[in-house]
Image (tube, grey):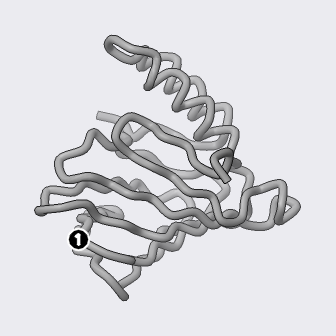
Amino acid sequence: MTDDIVRIGALTLKFLIDDKASNGTMMLFEVTVPEQAKVPAPHYHREVDEAVYGLSGTLTFTVGAVAYEISAGQFVFVPRGVVHHFKNNHTGEARILSMLTPASIGKAFFVETAAVMNAGGPPDIEKVKAIMQRHGLVPAAG
């Protein structure tokens, strides 16, 4: 279904289970990250844990001060409150499966962020930060 796909810049998110389908308990989505794609800034989740599982390619996923090279079959856990971010500095696209629990950061966060990031021209970073805060994400200082 096309309504299960959200594009934020070059990133593609395919929602397998969203916050509505799980009654807010968890969300499961696939993220495709082209090489050198612009990615979200370092941030943390106030009330949500995240598990990331590699499907293909290699994605550098940093949790706290530790950088993990996530490729097919590898995973990393991101506890709530821990700053994290990812990037694809490798050749080709990388694909991961991400699970958020509980799903208080719902699909609406990604849809709202996409509207700002895909509007054309430089994105309004203050609007993005406000969306993040409203959905329980906190941009990292610095």
Q: Look at 44% across and 25% down and name the residue there.
A: 117
Quarter the N terminus occupies: bottom right
- Residue 125: where, in percent of width, then height? 41, 20
Q: Quadrant of residue 56?
A: bottom left
Q: Look at 56% across and 57% down and name the residue there.
A: 14
Q: Nearer the viewer, residue 130 or 69?
A: 69
Amino acid type at mark 1: Thr
State the SS at label 1.
Answer: strand
- Residue 141: where, in percent of width, then height? 36, 36
- Residue 34: where, in percent of width, then height? 26, 52
- Residue 95: where, in percent of width, then height? 37, 66
Q: Nearer the viewer, residue 23 or 136?
A: 23
| Residue 76 to residue 11: above or below | below
The crowding category of the residue bearing disc 1, from other C-alpha atoms within 10 Å (few below 14, some 14 to 19, many at least 20), is: many
Tell me if 125 is positioned left or right of 79 in this view: left
User: To which residue does mark 1 refer?
Assistant: 58
Looking at the image, how many numbered discs can be counted on the residues?
A: 1
Tell me if 33 is positioned left or right of 112 in this view: left
| Residue 102 to residue 42: above or below | below
Q: Look at 28% across and 79% down and name the residue there.
A: 71
Quarter the C terminus occupies: top left
